[in-house]
Image: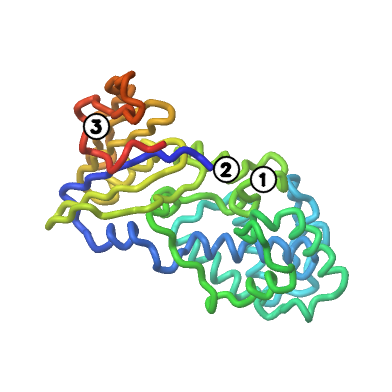
Amino acid sequence: MPNWCANRLMFSGIKDRYALKTWITGGELSLNRRARKEGIQLFLAGCAGILRPLTEQVYPPYPLLVSSGTAADNRLSTKAYSDWLTAFMAGAELDAETCKKLHQHWLDSDIRHYRWSTLSDPEQAVISRLYQQKSFDWGDSFQPSPVNAWWDSLCNGDDAAPAAEPMDFREVLPGRLDIEVNGFNGGLLTDIPSSYGHYVNLYGCKWPVGYDANICFEGENTLTVDFDTPWSPVSEVVVATLSQLCDGEVEHWFAEQGCDYCGYARYINGETEVYITDELEWDETDPDDEDSFLCVTGPDWIINNVAHFGG
């Protein structure tokens, strides 16, 4: 398990407090998680030859995806899969509008009607082999479901649409479809980053959500939220973008005592006004008191501005 970095964001001058609170608390339909889930199924359908594009394609990162050739006709499902494949190979960014288009491609492809029991033995074999390789990434669990149950859960679509996680930074800065299919551990698509590497580079932390999010203050046009991130604080570009989306000011305090660092930043309408980092300051323990322990005493600007000091 990682050390946790404590974060506090204070929003001022926000125009849409309801939208901000909805993002913080999560629970609504997650467009990017749905696009990922449906994208994995369409990727497998292509690898197994269940769906084929209108024209010959080449995809060096994973040639099996397009190795079955072209479709025999140009029905709607074929065009839908071809459009999805074009977006996938281009590394489409999963912004809200693109996610809605990708969902329509998934619906029009009719892949949801291909339950496990309807697939041929060769089709099942391809899917089973890939699932065995990527089940921990794709199944989002250390105890993945059997492949037949997992596949049928993908077919359920809107009946099992994923909910947004609290403070999902991928809704602030969109991820990429091919990277999401490649998964947290990567190793499937040649020369395509793992989502782990992509998350750390873009969002500043390996899991791009705010953990234990707690709105600790709320006013008419201001809101303060405490949350944790693994190892390091959420990135500068995420918070700067948040300030732009909120059309206001965002202040960010963060601390992680395991590595003895802390920081403060202020952003206004997408621009960084202040960004400073420092080491935590500690008092001294009493050598004659075996129950004494170190306490953080500074810098002054971090005291009372985070819920805890991480670790």
Q: Earlier in the sequence, mark 2 or mark 3?
A: 2
Q: Amino acid at mark 2?
A: Tyr
Query: Disc 2 marks which residue?
Result: 196
Query: Disc 3 marks which residue?
Result: 302
Q: Is 207 on the left or on the right of 289, as rendered?
A: right
Query: Disc 1 marks which residue?
Result: 186
Q: Which one is in front, 184 or 56? A: 184
How packed is label 2: few (under 14 Cα within 10 Å), some, or many (20 or more)? some
Q: Earlier in the sequence, mark 2 or mark 1?
A: 1
Q: Amino acid at mark 1?
A: Gly
Q: Which one is in front, 166 or 73? A: 166
Say which of marks 1 and 3 sits in front. 3
Q: Earlier in the sequence, mark 1 or mark 3?
A: 1
Quadrant where the image shows the N terminus: top right
CA–CA distance between discs 2 and 3?
29 Å
Q: Is residue 256 visible?
A: yes
Instruction: Please report contact status of discs 2 and 3: CB closer than 8 Å, yes or no.
Output: no
